[in-house]
Image (spheres, coloured by chain):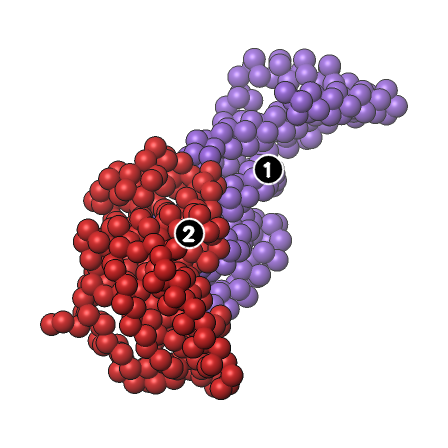
């Protein structure tokens, strides 16, 4: 309850600063919060924006799913084998260093305009984080527990489920924590630059029409969606982790 | 086959550091053997070789025991699994309920390790070793961190289980009373590199008490013996 009150105070302060900026600066560049919210409501009622938001949302989910499905096993392998880690570390560093716009140029050339480009770019942007965090999780494993399992010749499947997954769960939560917001940002930028369908394309349209209030309304929508997705995924993860959490 | 275990010329080095030096011994089924030696002598190393967790540098162990239960010095319980789940992790078909009841843990099946006292955790550690119905039970300074009353109570439980169904026990400790309470044979080890210095037969009744005059007399003899070894060193 206390944390909710603190969060509400934070949101209130943000709205105050926003309102002050709207008063100080040109209203057509920074519209007031109330105006932005009412415009957002109008946009949502009109329909196409909801469709665009959905187009972006499923790309975010797909990118996150791919990151977990590929990043976790890779991280597990690299965490267990020093040789593999040394082999793949330079590749991970290169992927981390390549700018988003370079990937974008490549994917537009390869696949043209469409959903594959933004998903692929978000996937590549988040993959190094997922791999390296999982590696850190594997290295953090309690060796005594693994030795105990080895002594009793416990089958590998049970060791992975009961020891590895339990130990890695806080690290998986950390990956998702950082990745959700990042995935939204990268997908929006990729849509903005490569076109197709989605909220990023709608933001581009607002900019082309020099519709700053519209731009603010869509930005607010993107922020709200980012927060909602984070909450939803965390809640799901909380349920999933229930059986691993210490009572 | 009377022997469940035969150790022949066993030595272990970690790089240039000798830890075990030329061990030779044998153990019959159902016997209770305790290694008594100073900390860091290499007792745990021997147990790890015995359990197949480490390789010997020289010599070998003929181990005829199929199922080995190991009670670690620290409980090594999976923190996010309940007491029951920690046992089922080792043996999904094990009769955890009656075992927990025997070890005074009835009603704690669904508790997590963080909710248990040190003594209870060590009882779960023991239950986990017993759930496979071992031929050989290894105790690696299993009670060293427990207070006297908890230690005594757990050891009495082990003794009772052994009296009902004798399984082979190998334990290491540096506590004389603990050794005398548990063992039929005590092997005294030198400081590192550990060598077998002397073997002592403990001719006490199987059903023992920590305060029995016989045990106290043997403890006093053992102290004198260890002091004489120390004087030689």
**Could you tell me which residue is drawn at 37 percent across and 35 percent down?**
B108
User: According to the colouring, which chain is red?
Assistant: B
Question: In the rendered image of this protein, does residue A95 appear above or below residue A243?
Answer: below
Q: Quadrant of the N terminus of chain B?
A: bottom left
A229 or A235: nearer the viewer: A235
Residue A73 percent coordinates (x, y): 41, 53
Label 1 packing within 10 angstroms: few (<14), some (14-19), many (20+): some
Secondary structure state at the residue bearing disc 1: helix
Residue A205 percent coordinates (x, y): 63, 29
**Could you tell me which residue is drawn at 53 percent across and 52 percent down?**
A133
Q: Is A214 positioned to the left or the right of B120 in the image?
A: right
Question: In the rendered image of this protein, does residue A231 appear above or below residue B67?
Answer: above
**Residue B161: assigned label:** none
B145 or A145: nearer the viewer: B145
Host chain of mark 1? A
Q: Which residue is mark 2?
A: B151
Secondary structure state at the residue bearing disc 2: helix
Task: Determine if residue B101 is in view.
Answer: yes
Q: Residue B137 occupies which quadrant of the picture?
A: bottom left
**Could you tell me which residue is drawn at 28 percent across and 42 percent down?**
B102
Label 2 packing within 10 angstroms: few (<14), some (14-19), many (20+): some
Q: Is B218 positioned to the left or the right of A101 in the image?
A: left
B217 or A56: nearer the viewer: B217
**Residue A181: assigned label:** 1
User: According to the colouring, which chain is purple?
Assistant: A
Host chain of mark 2? B
Q: Residue B9 occupies which quadrant of the picture?
A: bottom left
Question: In the rendered image of this protein, does residue A184 appear above or below residue A167?
Answer: above
Furthest-right residue in view?
A24
Q: Is A164 positioned to the left or the right of B5 in the image?
A: right
Furthest-left residue in view?
B1
Q: CA distance from mark 2 to mark 1?
A: 53 Å
């Amino acid at each position: 309850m206390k944390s909710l009150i603190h969060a509400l105070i934070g949101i209130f302060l943000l709205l105050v600063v926003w309102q002050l900026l709207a008063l100080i600066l040109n209203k057509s560049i920074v519209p007031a919060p109330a105006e932005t919210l009412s415009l957002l409501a109008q946009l949502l009622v009109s329909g196409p924006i909801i469709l665009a938001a959905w187009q972006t949302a499923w790309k975010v989910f797909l990118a996150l799913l791919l990151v977990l499905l590929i990043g976790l096993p890779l991280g597990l392998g690299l965490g267990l084998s020093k040789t593999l880690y040394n082999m793949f570390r330079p590749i991970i560093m290169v992927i981390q260093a390549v700018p988003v716009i370079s990937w974008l140029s490549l994917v537009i050339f390869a696949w043209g305009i469409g959903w594959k480009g933004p998903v692929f770019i978000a996937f590549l942007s988040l993959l190094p984080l997922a791999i390296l965090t999982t590696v850190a999780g594997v290295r953090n494993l309690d060796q005594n527990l693994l030795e105990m399992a080895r002594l009793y010749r416990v089958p590998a499947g049970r060791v992975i489920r009961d020891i590895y997954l339990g130990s890695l769960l806080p690290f998986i939560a950390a990956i998702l924590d950082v990745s959700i917001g990042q995935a939204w940002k990268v997908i929006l930028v990729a849509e903005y630059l490569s076109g197709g369908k989605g909220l990023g394309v709608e933001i581009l349209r607002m900019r082309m029409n020099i519709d700053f209030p519209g731009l603010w309304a869509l930005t607010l929508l993107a922020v709200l969606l980012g927060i909602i997705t984070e909450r939803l995924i965390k809640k799901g993860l909380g349920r999933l982790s229930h059986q691993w959490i210490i009572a | 086959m009377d022997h469940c275990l035969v150790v022949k010329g066993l030595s272990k080095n970690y790089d240039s550091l000798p830890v075990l030096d030329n061990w030779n011994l044998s153990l019959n089924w159902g016997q209770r053997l305790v290694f008594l030696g100073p900390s860091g002598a290499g007792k745990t190393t021997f147990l790890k070789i015995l359990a197949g967790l480490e390789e010997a540098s020289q010599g070998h162990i003929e181990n005829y025991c199929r199922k080995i239960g190991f009670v670690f010095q620290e409980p090594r319980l999976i923190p996010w699994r309940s007491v029951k789940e920690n046992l089922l992790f080792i043996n999904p078909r094990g009769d955890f309920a009656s075992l927990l009841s025997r070890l005074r843990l009835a009603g704690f099946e669904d508790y997590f390790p963080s909710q248990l006292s040190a003594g209870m955790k060590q009882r779960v550690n023991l239950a986990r070793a017993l759930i496979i119905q071992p031929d050989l039970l290894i105790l690696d300074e299993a009670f060293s961190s427990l207070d006297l009353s908890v230690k005594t109570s757990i050891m009495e439980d082990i003794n009772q289980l052994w009296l009902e169904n004798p399984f082979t026990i190998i334990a290491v400790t540096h506590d004389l009373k603990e050794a005398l309470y548990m063992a039929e044979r005590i092997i005294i080890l030198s400081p590192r590199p550990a060598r077998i210095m002397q073997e002592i037969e403990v001719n006490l009744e199987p059903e023992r008490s920590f305060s029995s005059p016989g045990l106290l007399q043997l403890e006093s003899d053992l102290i004198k013996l260890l002091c004489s070894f120390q004087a030689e060193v």
